[in-house]
Amino acid sequence: MKPFLTAYWKNLLMFNYEIEPSVLYPYLPKRTELDFWNNTCYVSLVGFMFLNTRIKGISVPYYRNFEEFNLRFYVRFKDKELWKRGVVFIKEIVPKRMISFIANTFYGEHYLYVPMKNSLKENDDSLEIKYEWLFAKQWNFIKAVADKKSFMAAANSEEEFITEHYWGYTKLSEALTSEYRVTHPAWNIHKVNSFELQCNVAAMYGEKFQDYLVKPRSVFMADGSEIAVMNKSIIVV
């Protein structure tokens, strides 16, 4: 089966926060349940680069390379005897109107178009990365300085839990859930030595997230890889 979308995801900055599970229940798709690591419920703010993007194998000029910033949480779905681990996106922002339209129309996602920019500075032993977006007439940003050297995430580690969810689930209605697979190899991890986030949380996500997206439990960077997003299917209740 040919994928719906292919791209290269690069330099994924991941700010990970503990959150009260009840905050996420309104966003939880039917037949999925929250996925925990060490009895902790996580949400993540993630900034990264979309590169060499192709839709149905077609590369569209001016839509190949762009930034994305999203807020996501982690779920699992039992398909017969198999547990599938996935993510649910609360909001995804991109600087391309067509990408936002396609994702919202064909996948029922919650994309928002806003102006964005990024910067990357490579030093001998470190990477300085920054993603910025304009929201409510204010420039917000996520940035970090990470080790240039990377490592494989340890088995059953927090890094493995955050990065290795290979399914996407979307709440289409109270009764309908869509499912799609995202394929990619395991990513290497870069240790983050300093970081900063400026985000109008209340305006972007609502006041109920404001008390939780304050101090992250962890921050790291994944190097990324080629990815493929497969066509969606509808989970029948």
Image (tube, helix red, strand yellow):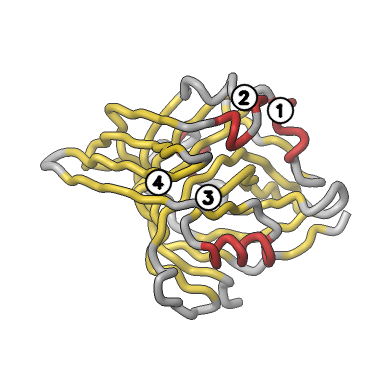
Q: Which residue is mark 3?
A: 93
Residue 5: mark: none
* Crowd tier of the residue under label 4, counting other residues whose Cα lies within 10 Å: few below 14, some 14–19, many 20 or above: many
* Crowd tier of the residue under label 2, counting other residues whose Cα lies within 10 Å: few below 14, some 14–19, many 20 or above: some
Answer with the quarter of the image where residue 28 lies: top right
The nearer-to-camera label among 3 and 1 is 3
Hey, what amino acid is under mark 4?
A: Leu
Hey, what amino acid is under mark 3?
A: Ile
| Mark 2 or mark 3: whose residue is earlier in sequence | 2
Residue 107: x %, y % from top left: 67, 62
The residue tagged with tag 2: helix, strand or loop? loop
Residue found at the very far bottom of the displayed protein:
58
Residue 23: x %, y % from top left: 71, 28
Q: Which residue is mark 1?
A: 23
> Compared to 39, does 90 lie above or below?
below
> Compared to 38, does 178 lie above or below?
below
Mark 1 to mark 2 CA distance (whole Å): 7 Å
The residue tagged with tag 1: helix, strand or loop? helix
| Left or right: 98, with 79 as reference point | left
Answer with the quarter of the image where residue 2 lies: bottom right
Mark 4 to mark 1 CA distance (whole Å): 25 Å
> Compared to 26, does 188 lie above or below?
below
The nearer-to-camera label among 2 and 3 is 3
Relative to the observer, which residue lies in front, 44 or 138? 138
> In what quadrant of the picture does the C terminus appear?
bottom right
Q: Residue at x 27, y 36 (%)?
A: 146
